[in-house]
Image (cartoon, rainbow, N blue to C red):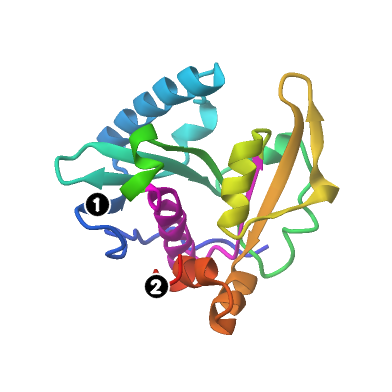
């Protein structure tokens, strides 16, 4: 598997949302996004959702015009260590020669920005994650989830369940591994029949 090009930073994302800025967090902003994740995960899932992998992760955030964090997500790469998910499952069927696989996790959106006018924000964060990935040489994203409603969100964002990689966890129960192949996402965008794929790859919002 080739190394990802992590020397550059994306900076601001595409103009997908009026008055929303998408950035990779610096150290100070990272502490704020982790604080928000602890609060939301604790309330919704019963655990804080922060671990040792956050120290080496890239943290993507959406900010409103006042600087409030509306959403956060972390991206893990295989540098300097294996992905968090590799504690539980072998990824040799995805980590093929010429591929650069990264892991999405720690994803949250403020509840008031999941519906109504803000309902597109989760997809906009995924769009920014794809932009970040393509800018850094990433070819595939993987994630794990045991929460069914989140599984549906990721499926909408073009992730596909890998039934062959599902595993049982003593605390979480059945955990699903999901995979996004950038080359397949690009092809679905070019084909023009999948408006979500087109949005994720190009930022075009028509039809979704």
Q: Residues within 10 Å of mark 2 (few under 14, many from 20)?
A: some
Report the residue marked by disc 2. Answer: 204
Q: Which residues are magenta?
A: 119-144
Residue 79 vs residue 151: left or right? left
The extreme front residue here reads: 116
Instruction: Identify the secondary structure beneath mark 1.
Output: strand
Q: Residue at x 34, y 35 (%)?
A: 112
| Mark toward the start of the polypeptide (1 vs 2) | 1
Give x and y (percent) for residue 179.
67, 55
The residues tagged by marks 1 and 2 sit, at their Cα atoms, a distance apart of 17 Å
Report the residue marked by disc 1. Answer: 20
Instruction: Identify the secondary structure beneath mark 2.
Output: loop
Q: Residue at x 31, y 46 (%)?
A: 62
Give x and y (percent) for residue 140.
62, 61
Query: Which residue occupies the foreground of this view, 66 or 24?
Result: 66
In the picture, residue 13 is in which quadrant?
Answer: bottom left
Q: Is residue 204 above or below residue 60?
A: below
Q: Residue at x 40, y 48 (%)?
A: 119
Query: Which residue occupies the foreground of this view, 168 or 85?
Result: 168
Quadrant for the N terminus, please: bottom right
């Amino acid at each position: 598997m080739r190394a990802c090009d992590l020397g550059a930073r994306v900076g601001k994302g595409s103009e997908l949302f009026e008055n929303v800025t998408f950035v990779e967090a610096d150290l100070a902003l990272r502490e704020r996004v982790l604080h928000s994740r602890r609060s939301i995960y604790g309330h919704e899932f019963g655990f804080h959702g922060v671990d040792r992998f956050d120290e080496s992760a890239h943290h993507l955030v959406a900010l409103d015009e006042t600087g409030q964090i509306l959403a956060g997500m972390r991206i893990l790469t295989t540098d300097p260590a294996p992905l968090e998910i590799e504690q539980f499952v072998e990824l040799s069927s995805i980590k093929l020669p010429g591929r650069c696989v990264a892991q999405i996790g720690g994803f949250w959106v403020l509840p008031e920005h999941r519906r109504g006018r803000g309902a597109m924000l989760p997809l906009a964060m995924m769009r920014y994650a794809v932009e970040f990935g393509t800018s850094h040489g990433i070819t595939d994203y993987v994630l794990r989830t045991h929460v069914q409603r989140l599984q549906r969100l990721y499926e909408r964002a073009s992730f596909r369940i890998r039934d062959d990689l599902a595993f049982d966890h003593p605390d979480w129960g059945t955990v699903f591994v999901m995979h996004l192949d950038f080359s397949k996402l690009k092809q679905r965008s070019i084909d023009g029949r999948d408006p979500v794929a087109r949005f994720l790859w190009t930022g075009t919002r028509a039809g979704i």
